[in-house]
Amino acid sequence: MGSVAALALSATMALAADKTIGFAQIGSESGWRAAETTVTKQQAADRGLDLRFSDAQQKQENQIAAIRSFIAQGVDAILLAPVVATGWDAVLQEAKEAEIPVVLLDRQVDSSEDLYLTAVGSNLVHEGEVAAEWLIGAVGDKPCRIVELEGTTGSSPAIDRKTGFENTLKGHDNLQVVRSQTGDFTRAQGKEVMESFLQAENGGKDICALYAHNDDMAVGAIQAIKEAGLQPGKDILIVSIDGVPDLFKAMSEAEANATVELTPNMAGPALDALDAYWKDGTMPPKFIQTESKLYTQADDPAGEYDRRKGLGY
Ligand code: GZL
């Protein structure tokens, strides 16, 4: 690295080195969430930042308490992955009054934009559209009864991924969502709800496809489908979102069909925006969008599994 670049890096490190960040994480409900935590801690360490971490066990009240604690500690910035979209106005107002910038990661809030510096995330509606477009292509004009495993009730991914999927199905009357229920983004609940869908739908014989708002619920559902004596990926097509290693493993065994990738590295763009803001007051855009890429069985799922399995999922 040239001396100028080294100087710039050390200047950034020096700038960041005395900064403290509070990270109010949702929990560890999915492989993707675990990877986001791993990557965020690494991104902070690479920048010489002091990261204080809180795991809210998927409870909003715990995240709010963590934010208040970070404010009391006088941190320089707060990262928040908001478990649900509503109920943040008061605590975000307190952070604003304490002049502590808040950056949202991977989910959105209904609060006014002036209560956070920026939000880093995917286009959640588009993810639902990509999943629906794949299924429309896979099914053609065959009748297809779809069951849907929704994410955490009231979370922006659950709301937006449902919207994108169902809007895209409009006009394709042969495809119909016949049952939809939350599995709270977890494998265990994905399996449990899928068992009830199978029971309600003639042992699963009347189900053509599963749309799961994340891969972990899909992996749980795959287990339930196999226990019901059916072949996931064949008897019941499976499309989901995240791109975690175990979904690629299932695809490599033809037990799943497609996933829309969600990068676990939301912290990189978030910390870059904070660096620029601290350096000279640069205001980032209110939304920094990450990529959404579709992977199917044609995209070397075994290789993708090998590439991803060590990345903290
Ligand atoms: C989406 C993110 C979701 C993941 C799930 O941006 O909030 O939360 O898709 C995780 O795996 O639980």
Image: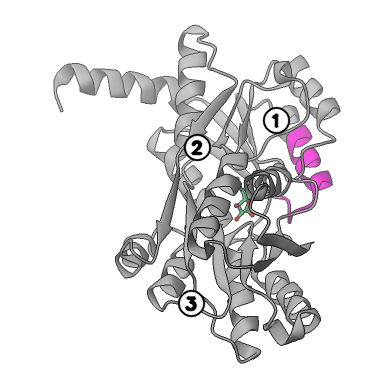
Q: Which residue is mark 3?
A: 255
Q: Which residue is mark 1?
A: 73
Name the kind of residue labelled 1 in the image: Gln
Give the mark nearer the N terminus: 1 vs 3. Answer: 1
Which of the pair 117/107 is nearer the observer?
Answer: 107
Q: Label 1 vs label 3: CA separation?
A: 48 Å
Residue 119 sits in quarter? top right
Comparing labels 2 and 1, the label whose residue is closer to the camera: 2
Residue 302 sits in quarter? bottom left
At x 55% / y 71%, what residue is drawn?
237
Outermost residue to the left: 2
Magenta span contains residue 9 = no
Outermost residue to the front: 141
Read off the magenta span.
56-69
Q: Is residue 98 visible?
A: no
Mark 1 Cα-neighbour bin, 10 Å: few <14, some 14–19, many ≥20: few
Q: Which residue is mark 2?
A: 267
Task: Give percent across and percent down for residue 190.
Answer: 69, 70
